[in-house]
Image: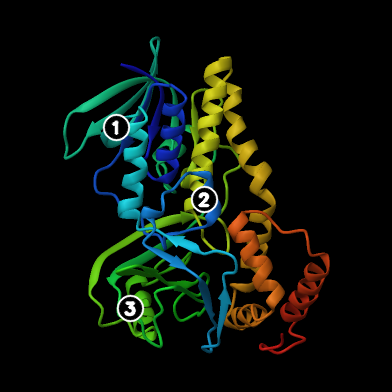
Amino acid sequence: MEYDVFVVGGGPSGATAADDLARAGHKVALLDRAGRIKPCGGAIPPRAIADFDIPMSQLVAQITTARMISPTGRAVDIPIENGFVGMVDREDFDEFLRARAVENGATRLTGTYLRIERDKDGTHVVWREKDGGAERRSATRLVIGADGARSNVARAEVPGGDKIPYVIAYHEIIKAPPANDRYDPDRCDVIYDGRISSDFYGWVFPHGKHASVGMGTEINGADLKKATADLRAMAGLSGCETIRREGAPIPLRPMDRWDNGRDVVLAGDAAGVVAPSSGEGIYYAMVGGRVAATAAQAALASGRPRDLALARKLFMRDHKTVFKVLRSMQDAYYKSDDRRERFVSLCHDIDVQRLTFEAYMNKKLVAARPLAHLKIGVKNLLHLSGLVRPGFT
């Protein structure tokens, strides 16, 4: 069987691309490894729920407060006004997305991607069936590489695909304790503390009957398990049962190019679309899958390989500015505990809180409050310059 598009990787990005293509009537294959679960806090904003028709049954928790915790233990609670942040468990959520793509006409394949071969008959994806099974060769017109931050498709097929910078994320899914003075099932805790991560942050995210406790770092050789154990001790979660442990790379910036100008386009982590500063990935992965599917459909219709470049153009048109602002925040505030202390202090400001979550919920910068933006800019400069003490609001 010859496919119009062969999607490598069945996470939110690949599954979304396969679903969109199948709904449009294309012959699409979705290849994914069995049993793969990506470490992830699991947060999805209302924009993702609306844009990608995510049923409420997939949400294991609805978060109404975010708590920022500084190196000295300062805690700032930020209420999420006019809504909530949904939480999903990737083990179930990713499977739901894959199954939905199949229901809409995608062909699901379970196995491991090996390489792409080309001959007089066209493009072929070579893959191996699960558990060391037979090697298969599937003919296709186009390939979408959605196989993660260390994408084999990207490394072999797209310029720069072997040089994507990333942090390592690690988390432990634990059995959640009853609500108490340190753990709130309706609150996400974000810990900015060099003892947990010297260049990123740690988190405690409720997942209903479970919780995700983890951290990320770009530092080679960092002891991720010890840092997470320390975080669990700080949060009073050491005695909770551990359900599973997971680790994976998280890309730091979008690649400069997402296609090979011939028959391959990247999506999701493979293209580097994880938000700086927050590390948010699910929404942007699904957007990446959608624009990759859009570009693939354009190339299939026109017969012009250059139309594959549309994926990156569409994504950056809508999200480039937000990514630049978040990158600047990370560079400014994550480099030392003194800066992290000042960042949490800045979060006391009510305008910072409102604008931050309006941007997060709607996935765009809010321009409706110029005076608030001006005030935040002045305070930001004061904190970065050290002219005010942490705690100034």
Mark 1 and mark 2 lie on one chain; the one further toward the N terminus is: 2
> Between disc 3 and disc 1, whose residue precedes?
1
Which of discs 2 and 3 lies nearer the camera? The answer is 2
Instruction: Choose mark 1 or mark 2, whichever is in front.
Output: 2
Amino acid type shown at disc 2: Ala
Labelled pair 3, 1 in contact (Cβ < 8 Å)? no
In the rendered image, residue 27, in percent from the top left (x then y), is placed at 39, 21
Q: Which residue is mark 2?
A: 48
* Image disc number at residue 229: 3
Q: CA distance from mark 2 to mark 3?
A: 32 Å
The three-letter amino acid code for the residue at tag 1 is Arg
Relative side of 379 to 364, left or right = right
Badge 3 density bin: few <14, some 14–19, many ≥20, Cα 10 Å: some
Count neighbours of disc 1 (C-alpha within 10 A) and say few if under 14, some if 14 to 19, many if 20 or more. some
Q: Residues within 10 Å of mark 2 (few under 14, many from 20)?
A: many
Q: Is residue 164 among the parts visible in the rendering?
A: no
Horizontally, residue 391 falls left or right of residue 102, namely right
Amino acid type, residue under disc 3 in the picture: Ala
State whether residue 312 appears in this view. Answer: yes
Q: Choose top left, top right, bottom left or bottom right for residue 242.
A: bottom left
Residue at point 79% right, 65% down?
A: 369
Image quarter where the C terminus lies is: bottom right
Q: Which residue is mark 1?
A: 108
- Relative depth, front residue between 163 and 86: 86
Near-viewer residue (183 or 59) = 59
